Image: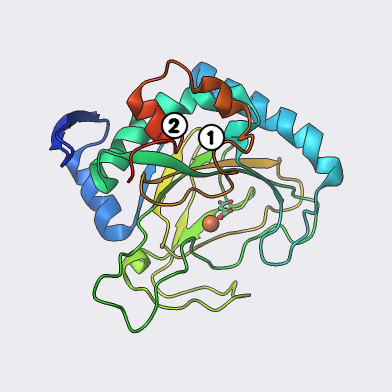
């Protein structure tokens, strides 16, 4: 892969160089289509560790979870970064972080980070059409700022017709149209995405997408959503500072300014 670098200057007098682990044409595709598939981006020990951590959390939570929501089926465990240290390995995983910094700016934080597991022999294991940031008003005020969040869908298992593909509508991250709830129908121009385990689909969080249900007999399907937003945006699922934020609090001593930004501690006024 051909890496390139971006040299940012920030108004606070600092500067920051980003070595981008993606080609300019990949960034362009993400910008125009609203999504980018990178196959087998997570491999080896990291993939094994993430799977093991997800399985541990699943074992703890599944007995108490509600997994049959007709709109968003499956097990959802939110804010995993505060639940298991294995996820801290993603804090400096440059193939994701550098793309976020190339498209959102140098100062980014971890946004939503969620485990989703779906079960082939259970009912209601699909998601309806949706997008993640539903806050754009009409009419659009002059100073309104569209929320730009990048969500990485890190597939820990093969995504295929059996396990339930992801379906997206390219370009919808830019339209700001309403999308009614409870819609599972095919859409014009939709693209069905399949990919091997370890692949990452990076989506602009306003992109229309849905996940198909796994077919009976398919293996369990694990997805880790790892989002980035600008540091000045409010994080999701995160108790406020000082309120016992979970195990990332233990990282706060002796870490770099950039990691403090990633954890939502700094990088805003
Ligand atoms: O499972 C998938 O492929 C996507 C799930 C999703 O879109 C979500 O949980 O928001
Ligand atoms: Fe989603």
Q: Name the residue rendered at 45%, 65% in the picture.
A: 208
Who's the residue at 53% across and 34% down the image? 197
Q: Label 1, on which residue?
A: 197
Whether residue 57 is visible, yes or no, is yes
Q: Earlier in the sequence, mark 1 or mark 2?
A: 2
> Which secondary structure, mark 1?
loop
Q: Which mark is residue 63?
A: none
Observer-nearest of 230 and 228: 230
Return the x and y of residue 231 as percentages of the image width and height. Answer: 36, 44
Marks 1,2: beta carbons within 8 A? yes
Task: Residue at 59% x, 42% y: name it.
Answer: 223
Question: Is 151 on the left-hand or right-hand side of 61?
Answer: left
Q: Residues within 10 Å of mark 1 (few under 14, many from 20)?
A: many
Name which quarter of the figure residue 56 lies in: top right
Q: Which residue is label 2 attached to?
A: 40
Q: CA distance from mark 1 to mark 2?
A: 6 Å
Instruction: Please indicate whether residue 68 sits to the left or right of residue 166 in the image.
Output: right
Name the secondary structure under disc 2.
loop
Camera-side residue of 56 and 128: 56
Is the residue marked by circle 2 packed among few (<14), some (14-19), or many (20+) residues within 10 Å?
some
Residue 66 in the image: above or below residue 79: below
Say whether residue 93 is visible: no
Quadrant containing the N terminus is: top left
């Amino acid at each position: 892969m051909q890496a390139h670098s971006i040299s940012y200057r920030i108004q606070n007098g600092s500067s920051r160089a980003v070595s981008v682990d993606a080609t300019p044409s990949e960034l362009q595709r993400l910008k125009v289509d609203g999504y980018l598939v990178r196959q087998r981006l997570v491999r080896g020990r990291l993939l094994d560790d993430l799977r093991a951590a997800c399985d541990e959390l699943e074992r703890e939570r599944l007995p108490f979870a509600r997994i049959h929501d007709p709109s968003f089926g499956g097990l959802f465990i939110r804010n995993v970064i505060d639940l298991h240290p294995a996820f801290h390995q993603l804090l400096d995983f440059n193939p994701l972080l550098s793309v976020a910094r190339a498209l959102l700016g140098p100062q980014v934080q971890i946004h939503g980070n969620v485990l989703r597991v779906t079960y082939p022999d259970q009912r209601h294991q699909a998601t309806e059409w949706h997008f993640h940031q539903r806050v754009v008003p009409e009419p659009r005020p002059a100073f309104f700022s569209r929320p730009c969040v990048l969500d990485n869908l890190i597939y820990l298992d093969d995504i295929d017709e059996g396990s339930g593909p992801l379906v997206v509508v390219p370009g919808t991250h830019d339209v700001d149209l309403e999308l009614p709830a409870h819609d599972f129908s095919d859409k014009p121009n939709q693209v069905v995405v399949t990919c091997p385990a370890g692949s990452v689909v990076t989506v602009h969080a306003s992109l229309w997408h849905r996940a198909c249900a796994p077919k009976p007999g398919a293996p369990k399907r694990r997805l880790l959503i790892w989002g980035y937003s600008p540091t000045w945006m409010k994080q999701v699922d995160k108790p406020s500072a000082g309120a016992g934020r979970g195990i990332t609090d233990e990282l706060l001593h002796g870490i770099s300014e950039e990691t403090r930004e990633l954890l939502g501690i700094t990088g805003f006024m």
